Image (cartoon, rainbow, N blue to C red):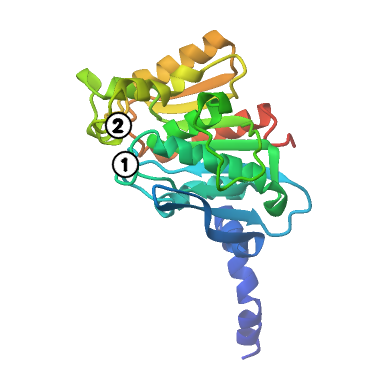
Amino acid sequence: MKSFLILILFLPSLLYSQLSETAAWSATIPDQYRVTPNITYGTASGYDCKLDVYCPANATSPVPTVVYIHGGGWVVGSKESAVLQILPYLEMGFAIVNVEYRLAKVALAPGAVEDCRRALRWVFSNAKTYAFDTARVLVTGGSAGGHLALITGLLDASAGFDETTGWDPTPVTPHVAAIINWYGITDVADLLDGPNFQQYAGAWLGSQLHRKDIAKAVSPLTYVKKSSPPIITVHGDADQLVPYQHALRLHDALKKAGVKNEFITIPGGRHGGFSKDDMIRIQERIRTFLKEVGILRMN
């Protein structure tokens, strides 16, 4: 009986000691983060644009911040559907802003771009409230979210997508420290017809007049310049939804402009769904990149 009681008393600690490092970390997350869901950051087309904030609960100084933008071809998807994608950033101690935006059924292009720029400006306007470090803001997403991350980080106010009336009485000028592009579209017009036609791109542009001009205006390749933020791109060379050539063209344009960037090719990789080994390799290189550009502090 005595031995049994000793076992019962020490069982929790014995089980904890057997947890993997990941499991032990995940057990502490509820106490480490404060979650504020469904904050309205703007209203457009009669639609309340919302975001969720995951903020370190006991931050004593500003922390690096990720603006995460979900994919779905600008026609489907939600911030909730992408929530597991933010886990690596929680583990690294980031604050996370998970953004929802108007899909094509609510607003055609460039509505999603306007919303993501609006969300970025919200981050900078509310930095003190949530301990966002405005010098270390990272924007990321996959597929259409990769496109929106790129365009959000590459644009400036002169492009004409930053409408502030009615939501931001004290306009700010946001500056992105880096972009992580997961197989994002870089040339929207390329997907509207021809061999690379994609139905989702046609749905986003609709039958608007001058839609080719709009497509160029919302294409990341249009805005690459010497002052662009550092960019790391991940793309499979067998991607069936976003041509691998889009990543190559972006890489070449960034190199020509003298912008720090890294290009990770996944041999045989399709539109996401990479292997565990590939994902581990990708995450290791992303962490190194973030240290090199000063978003993560060197240990």
Q: Is residue 83 visible?
A: yes
Residue found at x 67% / y 34%: 295
* Sequence-earlier tag: 1 or 2: 1
Tell me, for residue 192, which label it has, or none: none
Against 123, residue 20 (above or below) is below
Residue found at x 64% / y 39%: 171
Q: Amino acid at mark 2?
A: Leu
Against 174, residue 251 (above or below) is above
Q: List the single residue furthest toward the bottom.
A: 1
Q: Is residue 285 visible?
A: no
Residue found at x 36% / y 34%: 109
Tell me, for residue 104, which label it has, or none: 1
Task: Decide: few, some or many residues near mark 1? Use Cα within 10 Å; few <14, some 14-19, many ≥20.
Answer: many
Quadrant holding the C terminus: top right
Measuring from the top left, give residue 241's x and y in whole percent. Answer: 28, 31
Measuring from the top left, give residue 182's x and y in whole percent. Answer: 44, 33
Against 149, residue 237 (above or below) is above
Tell me whether circle 1 and circle 2 mark residues in contact (CB < 8 Å): no
Q: Amino acid at mark 1?
A: Ala
In the rendered view, does 223 fall on the left or right side of 218? right
Element at label 2: helix
Measured Cα–Cα span from mark 1 to mark 2? 8 Å
Tell me, for residue 205, which label it has, or none: 2
For this rendering, which residue is in front, 281 or 292?
292
Measuring from the top left, give residue 242's x and y in whole percent. Answer: 32, 28
Measuring from the top left, give residue 236's x and y in whole percent. Answer: 36, 27
Quadrant holding the N terminus: bottom right
For this rendering, which residue is in front, 227 or 138?
227
Q: Quadrant of residue 30?
A: bottom right
Task: Decide: few, some or many residues near mark 2? Use Cα within 10 Å; few <14, some 14-19, many ≥20.
Answer: many
